[in-house]
């Protein structure tokens, strides 16, 4: 792999702003920071050809250092790319034009936990699991449990508007924020959103939440916290059709129930999940891997490769499988509220003639809830690639969106989906797709084709292209389509805040609409 040499003067200049151990231009560091957890980046690593390493990595330890770095980058016109845990899946940290990777993980202080006002103030480099563990010691929880909690940082959550597994009760991360500290492109440090400072006025923090490092660097946040739940209750139901399971979910939400967890699995995902619950101590993606093993043996004589290449043959076969759709529900909080809600939820689901499956599937989910996502990577070892796509829409549009994206993908990939993060107005859909890798070039081409088809189908069917993974590079081309004329206004704001376009260039589709200062 040929990686061009970075400008040496950059390390020298940055050495004037930071200590030597806070700056690196070593090749291993540059390669490590030239990717995130996006599946195409995983393909690049496997094909030994990472494309977008930064020129230099810096580890600031204070907001004053971040401010000096931003002012330096703006003066020199050098890209500055905020980097949290690198668990993003949309290419949000790729250094498309080289520049400085700004790793915030040394800014990980938890300043204050206020048990009276129920708030925590922390630096954004703090790891999600560590933050949650510290809160738990004080009998509290943020209520934010993304599958990437062991890897991701608070800054990455905020920059991508992340959703945890219990978002239906606690909200997405943006619903938890009271205030933010932001470093702008010119090095100015601003505080936004604190209710005491702007009662009833504009709430500027909304602008920076989800801005993926393109409008400012988030260095500190104040978040609402909750008491650790006294108890929890898990329920599961089998529905004869996906539509029925979704109708029951809608009724649950619109009648005012507040489940922490709602997951409805489509037929194939239900099959995989329930086989895991019934038959093994492993997660259901272990089952997928196990199912894949004989398939892989079969693949050696090419038939399975052919089947996946023409995945449309597989779909009708799967539709013959006798299966129902699984719903898993979880309630948590005070015992009386939890049991009352669980009772009503059961009544609603039985009204749809669902089969009561007891608490076992929910407990199984709880036990395996973090391991599932990491099971995709071994599939790459076996010659496949896999990825996930999360979209959302309103209830009336949910099945048409589901069908449109499935149709777009299933000509060339095996597709499964579950519905989670439910609201009164609608719900998100989380697709997993799996395809066979023929060669380096063809697998990357197929990857791009699949995403292009799926995103086009999503926008045409009126869905939103991102519920919680963000946009990054992966979905950038579809921003204008989704936002329409309002995207021009977003570009004007970007122009104003970052006139030289140094903040995370190439992300969120801004480069197509931003005028640059000479
Ligand atoms: C196995 C796995 C499971 C996942 N599960 C979930 C899930 O359940 N829910 C979910 O929401 N997501 C999930 N994700 C996606 C990912 O973990 C989230 O997007 C997470 O919020 C990214 O955090 P990070 O610290 O790793 O950010 P990074 O990947 O480092 O960065 C992501 C983006 O945020 C920007 N950024 C990072 N820090 C800052 C900052 N301080 N200021 C400004 N911009 C910044 C970066 O420039 C980049 O554009 C999962 C990913 C994986 C690999």
Image (spheres, rainbow, N blue to C red):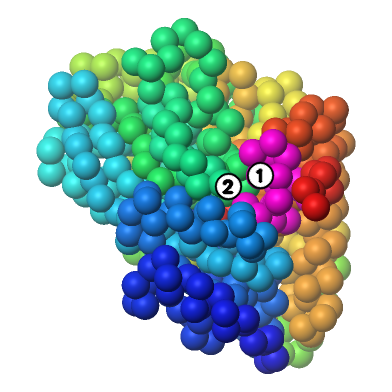
x and y, in percent, of residue 398 in the image = 71, 30
Is residue 283 visible to us here? Answer: no
Q: Residues within 10 Å of mark 2 (few under 14, many from 20)?
A: many
Tell whether 482 sits left or right of 365.
right
Q: At 85% across and 28% down in the image, what residue appears? A: 485
What residue span does the magenta drawing correspond to?
Answer: 494-511
Figure check: 395 above or below 292: above
x and y, in percent, of residue 155 in the image = 44, 48
Q: At 44% across and 63% down in the image, what residue appears? A: 103
Residue farthest to the left, as pictured: 138
- The residue wearing badge 1 is 498
Q: Earlier in the sequence, mark 2 or mark 1?
A: 2
Circles 2, 1 touching at the beta carbon (< 8 Å)? yes
Tell whether 199 sits left or right of 292.
left
Figure check: 367 above or below 184: below
- The residue wearing badge 2 is 185
């Amino acid at each position: 792999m040929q990686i061009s040499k970075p400008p040496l003067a950059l390390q020298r200049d940055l050495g004037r702003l930071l200590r030597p151990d806070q700056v690196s231009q070593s090749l291993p560091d540059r390669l490590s920071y030239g990717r995130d957890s996006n599946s195409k980046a995983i393909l690049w690593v496997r094909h030994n050809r990472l494309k977008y390493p930064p020129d230099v990595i810096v580890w600031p330890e204070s907001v004053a250092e971040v401010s000096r770095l931003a002012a330096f980058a703006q003066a020199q016109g050098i890209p500055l790319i905020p980097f949290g845990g690198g668990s993003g899946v949309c290419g949000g940290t790729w250094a498309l034009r080289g520049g400085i990777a700004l790793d915030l993980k040394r800014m990980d202080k938890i300043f204050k936990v206020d048990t009276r006002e129920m708030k925590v103030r922390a630096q954004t480099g703090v790891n999600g699991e560590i933050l949650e563990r510290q809160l738990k010691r004080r009998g509290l929880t943020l209520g934010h449990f993304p599958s990437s909690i062991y890897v991701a940082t608070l800054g990455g959550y905020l920059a991508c508007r992340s959703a945890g597994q219990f978002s239906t009760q606690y909200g997405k991360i943006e619903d938890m924020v009271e205030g933010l500290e932001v470093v702008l492109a010119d090095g100015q440090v601003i505080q936004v959103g604190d209710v005491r400072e702007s009662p009833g006025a504009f709430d500027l923090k909304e602008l920076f939440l989800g801005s993926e490092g393109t409008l400012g660097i988030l260095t500190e946040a104040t978040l609402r916290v909750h008491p650790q739940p006294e108890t929890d209750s898990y329920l599961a139901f089998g529905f004869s059709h996906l539509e029925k399971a979704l109708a029951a979910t809608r009724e649950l939400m619109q009648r005012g129930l507040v489940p922490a967890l709602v997951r409805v699995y489509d037929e194939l995902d239900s099959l995989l999940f329930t086989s895991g619950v019934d038959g093994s101590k492993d997660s259901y993606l272990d089952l997928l891997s196990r199912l894949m093993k004989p398939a892989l043996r079969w693949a050696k004589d090419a038939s399975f490769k052919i089947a996946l290449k023409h995945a449309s043959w597989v779909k009708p076969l799967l539709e013959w499988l006798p299966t129902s759709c699984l719903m898993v529900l979880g309630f948590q909080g005070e015992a009386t509220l939890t049991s009352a809600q669980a009772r009503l939820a059961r009544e609603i689901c039985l009204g749809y003639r669902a089969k009561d499956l007891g608490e076992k599937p929910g407990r199984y989910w709880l036990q395996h809830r973090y391991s599932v996502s990491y099971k995709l990577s071994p599939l790459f070892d076996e010659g496949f690639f896999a990825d996930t796509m999360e979209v959302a829409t309103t209830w009336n549009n949910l099945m048409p969106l589901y069908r449109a994206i499935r149709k777009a993908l299933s000509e060339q990939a095996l597709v499964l989906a579950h519905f989670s993060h439910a609201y009164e107005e609608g719900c998100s859909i989380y697709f997993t797709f799996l395809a066979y890798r023929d060669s380096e070039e063809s697998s990357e081409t197929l990857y791009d084709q699949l995403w292009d088809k799926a995103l086009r189908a999503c926008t045409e069917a009126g869905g939103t292209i991102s519920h919680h993974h963000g946009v990054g590079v992966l979905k950038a081309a579809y921003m204008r389509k989704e936002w329409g004329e309002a995207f021009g206004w977003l570009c004007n704001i970007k122009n104003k805040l970052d006139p030289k376009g140094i903040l995370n260039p190439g992300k969120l589709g801004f480069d197509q609409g931003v005028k640059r200062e000479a």
